[in-house]
Image (spheres, helix red, strand yellow):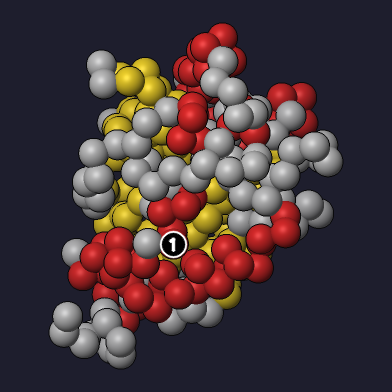
């Protein structure tokens, strides 16, 4: 299975340029699965500590508009998250999109940061705490949205449930890039699964978004990392290898 991860710039004009590059890369590499950043189709509104209804609504509309273009990545399946309005309130919803089935909501972000640059708990509420698996083509998929990566018991549960791959859409800062990669490697070891992540990047020094997508193997081996010079990468993963990893240490150890 060919999995694509990326770093996409936060500014709208730059994002449109990056999108064109992504579409070309996915077509050339014949990607089966594309992981996009967290709420990647709008500028990072959670940098502000003050909720603004107009800004939120603009982000929802921007995602609606760009979601209509996911067909440009077909036949690949796409995994990402987006802001949504629900009867229960505002949420950050993880989803899977495919040409055959269209948009499928998977789950809503549960663990929300509330600090400088990442005031998410002030912009939307957390979901119900369910972490169901999803199907993405031939792969059984786990979905951890950014901060949720640090709750490693969730990764382990996905692995026990048979996940081949855990997708981690992110919006994280440059000073913490190495820490996030460590988290992804630890999650892969806990789950016995591949872990892939894509991140937002900003060229504005006032917005701390550091880019660097990556994909790691079931034993924490780093398979690929994006850079500003190479913002999109594709890796062939072996689903059988992920299943075999679950029978090895430390995955076989009983809880």
Q: Position of residue 135 (x, y in %)?
A: 26, 49
Pick the quarter of the image with the C terminus: bottom left
On screen, residue 99 above or below 136: above
Helix, strand or loop status at disc 1:
helix
Horizontally, residue 217 falls left or right of residue 162, namely right
Q: Residue at x 52, y 12 (%)?
A: 53
On screen, residue 140 above or below 64: below
Q: Position of residue 238 (x, y in %)?
A: 39, 71
Q: Which residue is mark 1?
A: 150
Q: Position of residue 74 (x, y in %)?
A: 47, 36
Task: Give 241 or 143, whichever is nearer the viewer.
Answer: 143
Task: Give 248 or 78, whichever is nearer the viewer.
Answer: 248
Q: Position of residue 47 (x, y in %)?
A: 65, 33
The answer to which quarter of the image holds residue 189 is bottom left
Pick the quarter of the image with the N terminus: bottom left
Task: Give 236 or 228, whichever is nearer the viewer.
Answer: 228
Horizontally, residue 170 falls left or right of residue 203, namely left
Residue 125 visible in the shown view: yes
Q: Residue at x 64, y 29 (%)?
A: 48
Q: Residue at x 43, y 28 (%)?
A: 124
Residue sticking out furthest to the bottom: 249
Residue sticking out furthest to the left: 254
Q: Residue at x 66, y 60 (%)?
A: 176
């Amino acid at each position: 299975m060919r999995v694509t991860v990326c770093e996409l710039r936060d500014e709208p004009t730059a994002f449109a340029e990056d999108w064109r590059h992504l579409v070309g890369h996915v077509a050339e590499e014949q990607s089966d699965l594309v992981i996009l950043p967290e709420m990647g189709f709008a500028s990072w509104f959670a940098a502000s500590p003050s909720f603004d209804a107009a800004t939120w609504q603009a982000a929802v509309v921007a995602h609606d508009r760009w979601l209509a273009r996911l067909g440009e990545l077909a036949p690949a399946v796409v995994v990402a998250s987006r802001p949504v309005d629900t009867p229960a309130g505002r949420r950050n919803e993880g989803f899977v999109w495919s040409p055959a089935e269209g948009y499928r909501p998977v789950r809503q972000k549960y663990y929300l940061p509330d600090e400088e640059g990442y005031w998410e708990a002030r912009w939307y509420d957390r979901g119900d705490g369910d972490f169901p698996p999803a199907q993405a083509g031939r792969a059984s998929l786990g979905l951890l949205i950014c901060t949720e990566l640090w709750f490693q018991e969730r990764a382990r549960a996905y692995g026990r449930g048979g996940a081949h791959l855990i997708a981690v859409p992110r919006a994280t800062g440059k000073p913490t890039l190495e820490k996030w990669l460590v988290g992804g490697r630890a999650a892969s070891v806990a789950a016995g699964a591949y872990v892939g992540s894509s991140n937002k990047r900003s060229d504005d020094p006032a917005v701390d978004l550091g880019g660097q997508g990556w994909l790691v193997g079931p034993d924490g081996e780093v398979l690929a990392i994006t850079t500003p010079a190479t913002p999109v990468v594709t890796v062939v993963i072996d689903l059988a290898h992920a299943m075999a990893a679950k029978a090895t240490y430390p995955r076989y150890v009983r809880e």
